[in-house]
Image: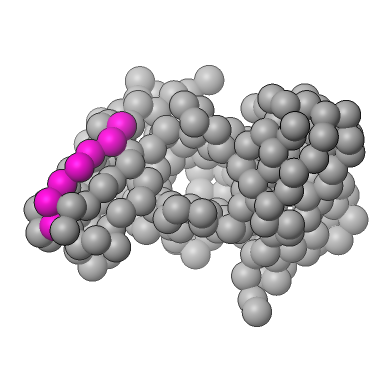
Amino acid sequence: GQQLNQSPQSMFIQEGEDVSMNCTSSSIFNTWLWYKQDPGEGPVLLIALYKAGELTSNGRLTAQFGITRKDSFLNISASIPSDVGIYFCAGRIGGAGSYQLTFGKGTKLSVIP
Amino acid sequence: DAGITQSPRYKITETGRQVTLMCHQTWSHSYMFWYRQDLGHGLRLIYYSAAADITDKGEVPDGYVVSRSKTENFPLTLESATRSQTSVYFCASRNPGLAGLSSYEQYFGPGTRLTVT
């Protein structure tokens, strides 16, 4: 099946720094999603991307749908302590009505005050 | 409250026992999903349902049974629990749309942490 390689696996950053993480695959995806999971909670959808090259922001978060459709990137600017958590990418090969998502293994973010 | 809820939030059971995890959503979403989350594996799909009385296997269905008699409920049953089923289980739901809007994507419940001793 399809696999998503998410990196880095974990990162420690100082409060106020910018963060970058990415997801890559050998398969072409039609949708890229980014979720955040707080400790003890379920994943929460942050950003959804539907077109190659699309750049979408949600507050301090910006995500991009790679031109090749095989990758996506998430950036967090000026990190704050509440950014701590695990960030997951997910991709969908089918159309918007297709149910199946492939998930990356997550990037665990720690923010040092 | 509207949304997706799971119960219990925590469960400890013994090997060989039957246990049922409950999932309830108030959005009337047609699709519902069960995932398990384990270190090193991320989220893996166990079963999904496209509508009431329609269910299908995901990536890791062995040892699990689901049913969906009502749109809003999607219980997951471990008929004879094994230690390898110790995990965090997430339920999710969505209404698939063709417009490519984030409101049509999967929304997750808070999870059930299951320990099999």
Residue B116 relative to residue A41: left or right:
right
Tell me the chief SS of the magenta region. Answer: strand
**B14 or A97, nearer to the observer:** B14
Residue B98 relative to residue B26: left or right:
left
Count of residue discs: 0
Q: Is residue B57 visible?
A: no
Q: Which residues are magenta?
A: A9-15
Name the quarter where the N terminus of chain B is drawn.
bottom right
Is residue A88 shown above or below A47?
above
Residue A66 x, y percent position in the rendering: 24, 38
Furthest toward the left, the residue is: A17
Residue A67 x, y percent position in the rendering: 22, 36
Is residue A56 shown above or below A66?
below
Residue A79 relative to residue A24: left or right:
left
- Looking at the image, which residue is at 28% across and 36% down? A10
- Looking at the image, which residue is at 35% across and 56% down? A47
**B54 or B20, nearer to the observer:** B20
**B26 or B86, nearer to the observer:** B86
- Looking at the image, which residue is at 58% across and 58% down? B110
Residue A111 x, y percent position in the rendering: 21, 52
Residue A108 relative to residue B39: left or right:
left
Furthest toward the bottom, the residue is: B1
Residue A17 x, y percent position in the rendering: 9, 53
Name the quarter where the C terminus of chain B is drawn.
top right
- Looking at the image, which residue is at 36% across and 51% down? A85
**A29 or B64, nearer to the observer:** B64
